[in-house]
Amino acid sequence: MIAWRCAPFAALTTDELYRILALRQAVFVVEQTCPYLDADGRDRDASHLWTDAADGTRALACARLFAPGARYAEAGIGRVATAAEARRT
């Protein structure tokens, strides 16, 4: 069973943040060959939704969730990433 977790930036542990950022880099920078600055300063304004692999060593999927007014007038979702091995599951 997949266990989704959601936490504001300040509540993330160092390990949780590392797993989320590693997944985003693997998908956006390496797989999609789209070099850009992932650390855009917006992570602090977002809640982070993610799920880890069963062994807890890596994130399988993640997204940033913005409350209304945090980035746009309405709520927003960004930096949605899914590890290749978790897609279509």
Image (tube, rainbow, N blue to C red):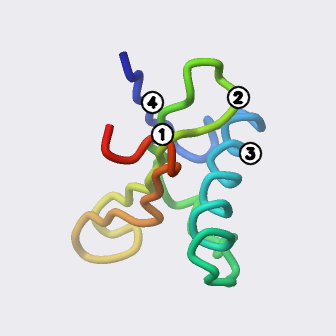
Q: Is residue 61 above or below residue 75?
A: above
The one of 89 and 3 positioned closer to us in this rendering: 89
Question: What is the three-letter code of the residue carrying label 4?
Answer: Arg
Asked if labels 1 and 3 touch by Cβ distance under 8 angstroms, the answer is: no
Q: CA distance from mark 3 to mark 1?
A: 12 Å
Discs 2/1, front: 2
Residue 25's quadrant in the figure? bottom right
What's the mark number on residue 18?
Answer: 3
First-in-chain label (3 vs 1): 3
The residue to which callout 2 is attached is 57
| 67 is higher (above) or lower (below) than 3 | below
Residue under the image location 50 percent in, 37 percent down: 7
- Residue drawn at x 61%, y 35% is 11
Which mark is drawn over residue 89?
none
Q: Quadrant of the C terminus?
A: top left
Q: Element type at marker 4?
A: strand
The percent position of residue 88, horizontal first and vertical second, equals: 31, 45
Which circle, 2 or 4, is nearer the viewer?
2
| Residue to which mark 4 is pinned | 5
- Three-letter code for the amino acid on which mark 2 is drawn: Thr
Mark 4 or mark 3: which comes first in sequence? 4
Dot label at residue 50: 1
